[in-house]
Amino acid sequence: MGSSLTDAGIVVGSARTERADAIALVRRWFDNMSARDLPGASKLMSPTISIVISGGHRFSRLEDFVAFGADRYESVRKQTDHFEVCEAAGGVAVYVRGEMSGSWKDGTAFTGVRWCDRFLVSGGVVVDLQTWSDLAETRLR
């Protein structure tokens, strides 16, 4: 006689949760950005996206956000260390934090720069992105 999970009183949920889907979406976004696939990353974002970064710089297009960074540094690489998700007004918020490294326009390297991004996911797309980092403080050194 075979046993099933219900025989032990265990209830197993097989459907993905909205939170897990939001994390998976943000991971795909980071994968696309790492591969410099801006069209792929943009498809994961609302056409009315709001992007705000440290210093209050605002963007409504991913291409403008990337161009702003290109004027500041030669290269940047983000290491994602931690994902957290919670309910938020307007959707599900995914917080991602880690460290970044790269080089400034003059070739000077930087490393160990802390960062945190907050993605608001609603309707299967990112509708808002806020990002904070210690990059400006690193630049001043």
Image: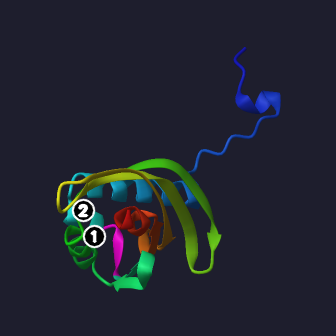
Which image quadrant: the N terminus? top right
Q: Position of residue 129 (x, y in %)?
A: 44, 73
Q: Position of residue 50 (x, y in %)?
A: 40, 82
Nearer to the camera, 82 or 133? 133
Residue 70 appears in which quarter of the rendering?
A: bottom left
- Labels 1 and 2 touching (C-beta < 8 A): yes
The structure residue drawn at horizontal position 26% and vertical position 70%, both measured from the top left corner, is: 69
Question: Pointer 2: what residue?
Answer: 40
Q: Is residue 43 magenta?
A: yes
| Residue bounds of the magenta highlight | 42-47
Question: Pointer 1: what residue?
Answer: 42
- The residues tagged by marks 1 and 2 sit, at their Cα atoms, a distance apart of 5 Å
Say above or below: 14 vs 36: above
Judge left or right: residue 2 versus residue 132: right
Q: Is residue 36 magenta?
A: no
Say above or below: 52 vs 113: below
Nearer to the camera, 53 or 25? 53
